[in-house]
Each structure stands twice: as C-alpha cells, then as structure tokens.
Image (cartoon, rainbow, N blue to C red):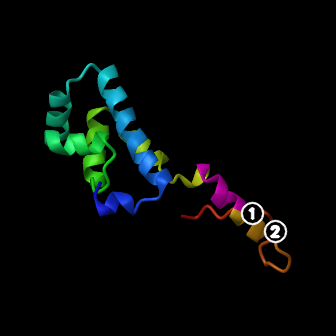
C-alpha cells in the first residue's frame, strides 16, 4: 500500500473501498461488462480497477464519468449536502441559541 493510502483515516479508506464495491454492484445490475462501462466512462481498465479497489488519487472527474455512465450522477449531489449534514445543523443550532446573539430566532442560515 502506498503512503497516500496509509495517510487516510480508517473511516475514509473504508468508505472508498465500500464505494468501489457499490459501483461494481451498480455495474452488474445494469448487466454491463467492465469494458462497456470503461468505454462509456472513457477510462482505462487500470483506472477502473483502482476506482473499484478504493485507491485514493482517483479524480472526481473519473468518479463523475463512471456515475454518469451508470446513470447515477445525481448521487453526487448527496455528498456533503447541507440539508442532511446533521452534525453541521446541530452546531449551527447551538450557536443560534447562545444568549446575546442578534439573530436568536433559531432559524438556520441556508443562504449558500
């Protein structure tokens, strides 16, 4: 394993590995061969192998092309979605409830 992979937190490394497995399930459900998916995503077999093994260093562009080829590109919008960021929402609510704040109405700032 290279040093970049070793530098990843365990949860991140596991997440990348799981993502690779999920992409393989999606490919198989669509009855696409690896070659067909690689051609549709305009990537090499080596790059696809690295992606499904969860190796770091794969670009977001590669991931995006594979998701598009699988008709899953809308799932990119779920990554770090402010509407589902429960930890961030809790922090924002806690700050909003502090006494002495001008805007203490408990409403979240959704102006992104």
Q: Report the residue at 23% width, 23% height from top.
A: 32
Please give the name of the residue rendered at 13% of the width and 42% of the height, measured from the top-left corner.
44
Q: Find disc 1 in the rendering and name its residue.
A: 93
Magenta span includes 18: no
Check disc 2 and report the residue beneath it: 97
Q: Is residue 38 above or below residue 1?
A: above
For the residue pair 9 and 83, the one nearer the viewer reads as: 9
Q: Is residue 84 left or right of residue 99?
A: left
- Proximity of marks 1 and 2: CB atoms separated by less than 8 Å: yes
Badge 1: how crowded within 10 Å, few (<14), some, or many (20+)? some
Give the crowd class for mark 2: few <14, some 14-19, many >=20 residues within 10 Å: some
Query: Residue 69's x, y, as percent?
Result: 26, 35
The magenta stretch spans which residues?
84-90
Classified by dominant secondary structure, the portion drawn in magenta counts as helix
Locate residue 88 relative to residue 41 in the image: left or right.
right
Residue 87 part of the magenta-drawn span? yes
Q: Where's the N terminus, which quadrant?
A: bottom left
Name the spot of residue 37 as percent of width and height, x first: 20, 32
Q: Is residue 104 visible to the viewer in this orientation of the structure? A: yes
Question: In what element is the residue under mark 2?
Answer: loop
Tell me what residue is drawn at x 54 percent, y 64 percent: 112
- The answer to which of 13 and 108 lies nearer the viewer is 13
Tell me which corner region of the image, top left, top right, bottom left or bottom right, holds residue 19.
top left
Residue at 39%, 43% (x, y): give it. Answer: 17
């Amino acid at each position: 394993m290279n040093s970049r992979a070793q530098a990843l937190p365990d949860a991140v490394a596991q997440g990348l590995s799981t993502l690779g497995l999920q992409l393989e399930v999606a490919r198989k459900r669509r009855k696409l061969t690896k070659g067909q998916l690689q051609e549709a995503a305009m990537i090499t077999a080596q790059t696809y192998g690295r992606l499904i093994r969860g190796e770091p260093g794969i670009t977001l562009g590669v991931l995006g092309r594979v998701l598009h080829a699988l008709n899953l590109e809308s799932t990119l919008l779920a990554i770090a979605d402010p509407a589902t960021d429960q930890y961030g929402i809790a922090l924002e609510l806690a700050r909003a409830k502090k006494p002495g704040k001008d805007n203490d109405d408990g409403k979240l700032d959704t102006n992104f």
